[in-house]
Amino acid sequence: MSGSLREAKVKSSTTTFPVYETGPQDDLPPLPNNLNASSTPFNESKEKQKLGHRRIDRQGEVSYKKVPTNALMGAVQLGITNSIGSLANKPERDILMSDFQEILSVVFPSEGSIQTPSHQYNDFRFKTYAPIAFRYFREMFNIKPADFLRSLCAQPLRELSNPGASGSVFYVSSDDKFIIKTVQYKEAEFLRELLPGYYMNICQNPKTFLPKFFGLFCYQSLGKNIRLLVMNNLLPQTITLHDKFDLKGSTYKRYASKAEKAKKSPTLKDLDFNEIYPDGILLDQAVYDSVIKILERDCLVLRSFQIMDYSLLLAVHNLDRATLEEFEAEVNEGHEGEGSYNPQDTISSHTSLLRLEKWKRIQSQFNSSLSSAEQGIPAMNSKGEHLLLFMGIIDILQRYKLIKKLEHTWKSILHDGDSISVHRPDFYKNRFQKYIFHTCFKRSETGPPTMKSSHKFRSLVQSYLAMRQSPITRSNRSIPTSSFAIDEKEEDEVDSKKLSIDHAPSLYPTRSSLSNRARKVERLFASSSAEPSDVPLRFNNTESFVQ
């Protein structure tokens, strides 16, 4: 042994290494700028593909706790179908305290069993937490079991490609009504503790901006526990959201990152909101008072449970901008290839009337007996543009415990303690309310504007709006140009049928007679000044939201 070691030493001592002299040399090999292996492009890309328990491999497949998300989605749909179906055999009754602690567990072998069908996934166990309690919550929000299953289990779920900061996986139902989110063990356990108080708050205050929870489940397979929470979807996918904010009321690191702003639909933060809306968002007096009242009550509930670090998710749909973009796009499509016609000559002086008509229709829906904040809250910005707001409080499963206290203490040493997000629940509540009530939202002191237009133009615009909601394909919408000439008989027919889509004329112009069409449209618009009639834009019957 000693001889072999001696020979190895002698051999290593005789090894020659290249020696480079000092001074300029043309043939010297370039030295690497950074020899740290952790900063190589491969490792950097590898780190970017991992966020929490969420991972993306080289093929682009997403996994959560090493379980492929597509397999997780299919197993969860099987489990939810079995769980909701088993509740149909249980009679309805009042909720007991023991119902909040109940856990229903079912095993799903791949070959199937008496209670479960066969499937292509690994064997798994599916747990349902507090099934009776969550059934009551779904009933309170008018969600029938058949509709719930149809939304979540009839078609494949859509996975959101933009995960949260915690690396959670989000699934959206096919009809955009529900979201399934993966949560951590501590969050799931805290929600179970929160359920009795949540039940009392929902019973006393059914109108709330707090998240609406519809189910808590757990997927177990191969030693992995994945907990999933079913909630309402605050953000509609059918309309364009021009701005989206995550508001906390703090200022430290409350600018969205460059990577976030580069996304197609970025989520901005408080300081971004202050730059985009320096004068805040204006709400009608009755709507403002109602929103403030609901938020105060919700924050008081969160404070009672020592909850902090929650946010107000605010999405803004600019109705004026969206209406103008849609109308210009369709007019441009109708006049494609006709360079002599400028669509701005036809719509530039009349788009405000179109916006007001669409705004009035949305307000009538908002003020109807079935309206709620989920359908959008009408508002305005300082420029007078009409907005539609979708908002709700999110991330309410964070308590001010030891870890958060240590985080607050450490950050307070380095920065202003009042500017950081993590803070005592009472201070967080007051700061959050001050920012939302006085900086984000402001009471409109003047009434909404009014404009004048003829009944003929209103009928045309209303028919256009009804046509926009029709599922008829674009190729079947075009009709002769004479449809633009609306006589009194057609006006009465439109009013009597209440904008039936089957009788709504198309506004897609034909290409046969450009000059005649332009003259007819101009003649129609010109008649609006001859027969003026007030079209007030007001919040009528806001009791449905205010009460």
Image (cartoon, rainbow, N blue to C red):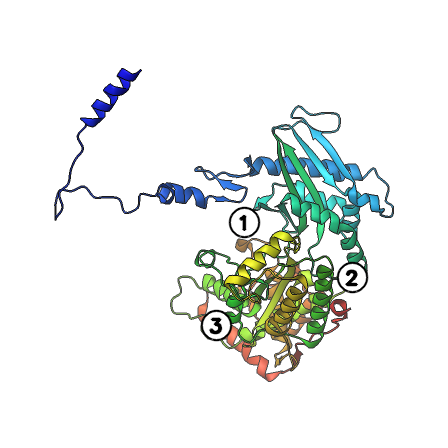
Disc number for residue 163: 1
N-terminal of the pair, mark 3 or mark 2, is 2
Quadrant the C terminus occupies: bottom right
Distance (Cα) linking label 2 and label 1? 31 Å
Is residue 232 shown above or below 90? below
On the image, the x and y values in percent for residue 121 come to 61, 29
Seen at 40% across and 45% down, the residue is 44
Q: Nearer the viewer, residue 205 or 523?
A: 205
Disc number for residue 518: 3
Q: Nearer the viewer, residue 112 or 471?
A: 112
In the drawing, does residue 64 fall left or right of residue 105? left
Question: Residues at badges 3 and 2 in contact (C-beta under 8 Å)?
Answer: no
Distance (Cα) linking label 3 and label 2? 55 Å
In the drawing, does residue 247 fall left or right of residue 83? left
Seen at 75% across and 70% down, the residue is 546
Quadrant the N terminus occupies: top left
N-terminal of the pair, mark 1 or mark 3, is 1
Q: Nearer the viewer, residue 252 or 282?
A: 252
